[in-house]
Image (cartoon, grey):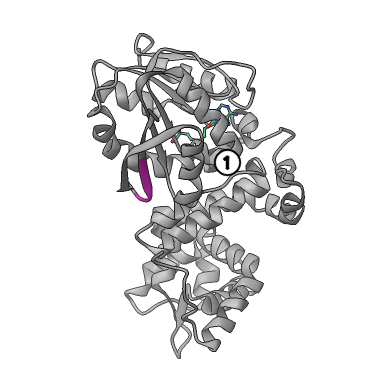
Amino acid sequence: MKFFTKDNRSALEAKHIAQFIAFGPVVFQVAKVMRDKGILKLIEDKTAGGGINLQDIASQTGIQEYGVRVLLESSLGIGLVVVSEDGNYSLTKTGYFILHDPLTIVNMDFIHDVNYKGLFHLDKAIETGKPEGLKELGDWPTVYEGLSKLPPHIQKSWFAFDHFFSDIAFPEVLKNVYKYGVKNMLEIGGNTGKWAVASTSYNPDVHITIMDLPGQASMAEKKVKELGLENRVSFFPNNVLDETKAFPKGFDSVWMSQFLDCFSEAEIVSIMKRCGEAITDDGYIFILEAFWDTQRFETAAFCLQQTSIYFTAVANGNSQMYDSRVFIKSIKEAGFDIVEQVDGIGLSHTLLVCKKVG
Ligand SMILES: C[S@@+](CC[C@H](N)C(=O)[O-])C[C@H]1O[C@@H](n2cnc3c(N)ncnc32)[C@H](O)[C@@H]1O
């Protein structure tokens, strides 16, 4: 393991980070308000010219001086801005990332809109193994039943977060998948149909059957119809947690992207076994996942480790962004060998190519 094996921090650094944790929600909300109220942007625009003072920020944003003052002072401690002797504020590199970095923006919006209130129930979720925080969004057994019904701004943040990672990975991974010559693919967790659409334009011969919950399947079906791809993409609405409903059969491959992380280890074994029945004996299962232990950068591992808590508190109560060793154990338990593993796809993904044992 590249990271997380040694405690390299001095006592002073450790105490500082402990305060970041203790004041975590304050730090988060201040950074978000500084971004959303346009204060960071205004300071950025004035930074090259030597910065901008509190009164000018207040008058140019229309926010009362008291509000600007507490936000600015908090932001100094957080490290979003610095101040000169004569009281002019300039943007720091951290402030720049809060304002412009796409990864930071999707993470911040996802945590705020989808998770912030639900996280308050994490302790209960850990006790019960249920997504106790989901009630803050709606009354569903898992977030996935509610996806198509979420309030628009929350749905937007959920999809932006989900698609941010797969949109970067898909163009890169198409060649790794279709070099295996597969033509009749079952895609489980097809969501809004992005993989199916990308596949049909990459490979003129492939037919995709999307299996997803009815709400998502109908969203994807609408998109596929708009694009005139009805002959290339079919649908099989299904809840894979209902073990009484068999998967359709006769495929040469199954594709699952950012899907199996929505399930517990026992559920992964059960889904994989049914995938095995859906494909021919020499068929392939392609799995695209982000594992925290295979990351090149510690920050990427950190993001995945923290994303796990969304699954615990809000999504379903029993899944996570996995350690690849835990995940691969379940794949093998279901009766598969990994015939190829490609790390470093897109921002953080690994492709696992699996075949039935023997
Ligand atoms: C995290 S999204 C991944 C979407 C897409 N494959 C991607 O890579 O961007 C997980 C998908 O799995 C679907 N899903 C979750 N639980 C499911 C279940 N029990 N049965 C069928 N689909 C499910 C969700 O509706 C969602 O479309």
Q: Position of residue 98 (x, y in %)?
A: 45, 62
Magenta span dominant secondary structure: strand
Residue 196: say if magenta: no
- Answer with the quarter of the image where residue 209 lies: top left
Q: Residue at x 41, y 12 (%)?
A: 250
Residue 350: say if magenta: yes
Three-letter amino acid code at disc 1? Answer: Glu
Q: Residue at x 37, y 67 (%)?
A: 45
Extreme residue toward the front, this view: 358
Q: Answer above or below: position of 72 versus 206.
A: below
Q: Nearer the viewer, residue 245 or 307?
A: 245
Mark 1 sits on what residue? Answer: 265
Q: Position of residue 67 (x, y in %)?
A: 63, 70
Q: Nearer the viewer, residue 306 or 276?
A: 276
Q: Secondary structure at mark 1?
A: helix
Report if residue 69 is visible in the image: no
Q: Nearer the viewer, residue 91 or 9?
A: 9
Quarter of the N terminus within the rendering: bottom left
- Answer with the quarter of the image where residue 187 lies: top left
Report if residue 16 is visible in the image: yes
Q: Which residues make up the magenta segment?
A: 347-351
Q: Label 1: how many residues lie within 10 Å, few (<14), some (14-19) or many (20+)?
A: many
Q: Nearer the viewer, residue 75 or 104?
A: 104
Q: Position of residue 318 (x, y in %)?
A: 64, 44
Q: Answer above or below: position of 295 versus 195.
A: below
